[in-house]
Each structure stands twice: as C-alpha cells, then as structure tokens.
C-alpha cells in the first residue's frame, strides 16, 4: 500500500517520467510465508538455504514486476531493478541512489500516523543518507491531500541558509510547471528572515525549537493546499535558532502531505 501511494503520487507530480522501480531483498531473504513453506519441504539446512535463495529471487521479481505494472498504468516509463543488500532497506536505497543518480528518490511511508510512519523508519534512514532529494509519501493521505497533489502549489520552507537556498532551487527545477511559494517562519530574528527574502512570513507556533517551527510550516502548507512541502536537510546551527536540519525531520513527523527533503551539499 505504501508503494502504491508512492507510485501514484509520484506519477501525479512527475507525469510521463522515466522511472526505476526498485525492490530490495534484505536478510532473511524471502517473505515469511515463503520461508515457512520451504522449511517444511527441505530435507536439511543446506537444502533450505538453497531453496530460499532461489525461490526468493523469483518472489522478488514478481513483486517488482507488479510495481512496474502499476507505474506504467500511472503513466510512467518504468523499468525494474532487484537488488540484494545486507545493509538494510534504508542504507540499501541510499546505495542505489548513489549508483543511479536519479533526479529524486520516491519512497512510501507506512504506519498508523504521520509520526509512526516516518520517524526511525526506512524513509527516515533514506532521508538521512541519500545524496539526492527524497520525496516521502504517506500511505495515509486523505482525499483533500490527494486532490492537492494534482494541482496544488509547492511550499518551500526557507531561512536564509545555504540549505534552504538549495531546497528552493530544487523545487523550481523539479516542479517547473507548479507555483512555488517560499515561506519563512518568524521567530523574532528579523535579520535572518530578511536574508531569506521569503514570499510569505508566518509566526512560529508557541514553544521553541524545531517542533514549533515545523508546526507553523505545516499549518501554512495546509492553508495553501500544498501538493508538496519542501525542506532542506541541513540549515542553520542551533545557535542561529532556525533549525532547518531539525525542521526537516520534524516536518516529516507532523504532516501527511508529501515532503521533499533536499540534502545539503
């Protein structure tokens, strides 16, 4: 379900794009059901290992082919990639990104809520390690959020740092046909926001730190009916108060809208 949400949302944001649908095989290889069935048919451990090795390859191929079918139906020009990794899904995807150098990596987020679906998960690890922009898509979006994906503006959080400058540039490059709205969260440091020159300024929510800043950014994105929220993964230090590095992670936890995280240089 998370993969389906990622494909459908990605296709709406990047129509007719070339895409690589990736399936990562991680230990223990093969699904739980497949391993249970093979365990009963193998005569010894060596045979079980061989069976799991061969059958898991076929299972992975079938699963990634299903993703390719979905991607093609959504209007993409897809190809399949199955990769075995012992590094785990998060680091494994980051390795794939290093090899393929895509414009953007799109990952689906699972879980019962925005925080549960992203914090400490595969998508969270990918965001921390990917050298390319990562679009995180929640599988729990509601109809209004899906509708916004179709034609809503792109909201970019800025703070005058190099990280937010990269985020703003990436938004313009990746979404050339969308309205891009920059917003700075005002925490009283007028000089900082003056340097950022945001299109909009909003007050930070009560409280301090990344949570209050992210809440203000998410509320603004909701008011604008944003298709995507864009943040930089590195920004000002804690001493400069506007914590885009922390805000990126907190924004992932606080919104169900797609979030594009742009890495620092």
Image: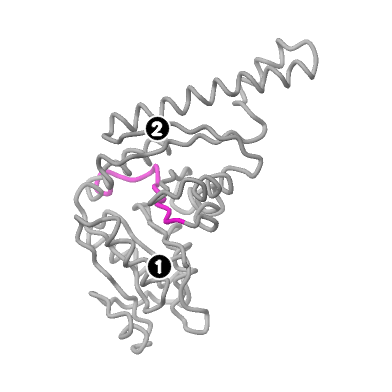
State which mark lies toward you, 2 or 1.
2
Residue appearing at x 74%, y 12% in the figure: 42
Residue appearing at x 48%, y 75% in the figure: 209
Looking at the rendered structure, the secondary structure element under dot 1 is helix
Find residue 107 and report its horizontal and vertical position in percent: 44, 45
Residue appearing at x 31%, y 30% in the figure: 72
| Residue that mark 2 sits on | 79
**Pointer 1 local density, CA inside 10 Å: few below 14, some 14–19, many at least 20:** many
Splitting the image into 4 quarters, where does residue 215 fall?
bottom left
Find residue 101 and report its horizontal and vertical position in percent: 45, 50
Q: Is residue 213 above or below residue 76?
A: below
Q: Quadrant of the N terminus?
A: top left
Tell me the number on the disc at residue 145. none
Question: 244 or 22, which is in the foreground?
Answer: 22
Question: 1 or 196, which is in the foreground?
Answer: 196
The range drawn in magenta is: 132-145
Q: Is residue 217 above or below residue 72?
A: below
Looking at the rendered structure, the secondary structure element under dot 2 is strand
Find residue 96 and report its horizontal and vertical position in percent: 52, 45
Question: 189 or 103, which is in the foreground?
Answer: 103
Q: Is residue 143 above or below residue 182?
A: above
* Magenta residue check for 39: no
Gap between marks 2 and 1, in whole Å?
36 Å
| Residue that mark 1 sits on | 214
Find residue 177 and report its horizontal and vertical position in percent: 19, 55
Left or right, 116 with respect to 163, comes to right
């Amino acid at each position: 379900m998370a993969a389906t949400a990622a494909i459908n949302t990605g296709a709406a944001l990047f129509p007719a794009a070339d895409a690589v649908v990736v399936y990562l095989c991680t230990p223990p290889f093969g699904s739980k059901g497949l391993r249970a069935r093979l365990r009963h048919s193998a005569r010894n451990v060596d045979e079980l290992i061989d069976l799991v090795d061969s059958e898991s390859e076929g299972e992975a191929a079938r699963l990634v082919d299903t993703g390719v079918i979905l991607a093609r139906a959504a209007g993409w020009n897809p190809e399949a990639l199955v990769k075995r990794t012992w590094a785990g899904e998060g680091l494994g995807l980051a390795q794939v990104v290093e090899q393929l150098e895509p414009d953007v990596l799109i990952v689906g987020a699972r879980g019962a809520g925005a925080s549960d679906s992203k914090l400490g998960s595969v998508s969270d690890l990918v965001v921390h390690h990917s050298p390319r922009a990562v679009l995180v898509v929640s599988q729990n979006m509601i109809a209004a959020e899906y509708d916004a994906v179709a034609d809503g503006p792109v909201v970019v959080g800025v703070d005058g740092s190099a990280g937010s400058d990269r985020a703003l540039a990436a938004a313009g490059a990746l979404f050339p046909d969308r309205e891009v709205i920059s917003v700075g969260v005002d925490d009283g440091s007028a000089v900082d926001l003056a340097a950022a020159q945001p299109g909009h300024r909003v007050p930070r929510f009560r409280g301090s730190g990344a949570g209050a800043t992210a809440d203000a950014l998410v509320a603004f994105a909701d008011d604008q009916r944003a298709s995507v929220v864009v943040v930089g993964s590195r920004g000002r230090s804690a001493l400069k108060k506007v914590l885009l590095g922390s805000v990126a992670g907190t924004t992932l936890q606080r919104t169900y809208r797609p979030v594009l995280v742009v890495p620092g240089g």
